[in-house]
Image (cartoon, grey):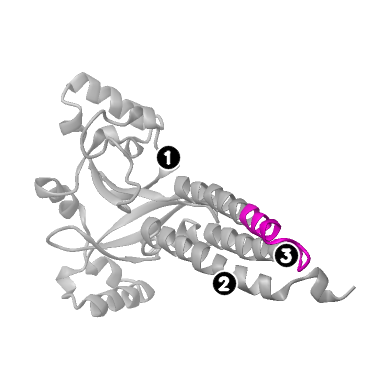
Amino acid sequence: MKFSQIFNLKAFIYHFIFSFVLIGGLSFFIVSLWYPDIWASELGGYKLIFMIVILDLGVGPLCVALSYKAYKSYKEKLLDISVITLCQLAFFSWGAWTVSISRPVYIVFDTDRFEMVVDQDIDRSKLPESGLFSALPLLRGVQMAIVDLETTVPDEEKRIEVNNDAVFGLDISKNPTYYVPYQGENIKKVLKMAKGYEYFAKNEDAKLKADAIIQKHQLADQQFKWLPIRYFSPQDQSQLFATVIINDQSAEIIDYILLDPYEI
């Protein structure tokens, strides 16, 4: 039996191109929307999408090439391709769901640093009934927020209780009930805690990284403001820190440095 009778190369190439355009395009959209900046690599977004794409681009076209036979009727060929394509899309959907629950949804300022909050960190039952944080951002990318117990928990006794829970391990930065918008008067808390260039200048390696950011964004030394950000690394299976560079007026994030500022 000839190889061409077992494996239809033309069908493989056509279906590979179709799969690459469809699956590859959707994967690029997911990564660019859900895993911006450094987070595609730090939170495992690239790895998850790579696994999905490789399986979809490999198994799907391979199955088509093996099932596509010249002696089959047009209906049989169409049925085979349709079933395989549906299976590909089903697998991609499952993979996209896996990626979605690992995606970053909020970067939250809490006390003196930022916290990266991913989808699966948040208990849906604790979402506010209304307001900006009543639903997780799905098609808006990562959103900014600030933990503010004085505003969100007016009752002093209840606020003491929440603070006590935080001392014993309850991470309030992962509860949108305590969030306020990252804007207006609220950002004064962020700017107040932001540190400057002089901290990085005391270490040669850190200074080089800071200087690169200053040059990239054309900042003056006094405009270089930063804060730590804590996040969970799936690769290291541990909590890590990086450095967030913020605008010295609006407190908007302008860049990141993959350097633990506590180790400088």
- Residue 86 percent location from the top left of the image: 59, 52
Question: Circle 2 — which element?
Answer: helix
**Outermost top residue:** 157
| Residue 257 appearing in the image | yes
Near-viewer residue (202 or 109): 109
Q: Residue furthest left?
A: 185
Q: Earlier in the sequence, mark 3 or mark 1?
A: 3
Instruction: Tell me what residue is drawn at x 53 percent, y 52 percent.
Output: 234
Residue 17 bears which disc, if any? 2
191 and 47: which is toward the camera: 47
Q: Quadrant of residue 51?
A: bottom right
Identity, as a three-letter code, of the amino acid under mark 1: Asp
Q: Quadrant of the C terminus?
A: bottom left
Q: Residue at x 42, y 40 (%)?
A: 121
Give residue 14's quadrant in the image: bottom right
The main secondary structure of the magenta stretch is: helix
Image quadrant where one finds the N terminus = bottom right
Query: 10 or 131: nearer the eye?
Result: 10
Which residue, given by chain and number where applicable, does mark 3 sit on?
Answer: 68
Q: Which residues are magenta?
A: 65-83
Q: Which residue is identified by label 1? A: 121
Q: Nearer the viewer, mark 1 or mark 2?
A: 2
Report the disc number at residue 136. Answer: none
| Residue 209 covered by magenta stretch | no
The CA span between labels 3 and 2 is: 16 Å
Of labels 3 and 2, earlier in sequence is 2
Q: Which residue of the protein is positioned furthest toward the right in this rendering?
A: 1
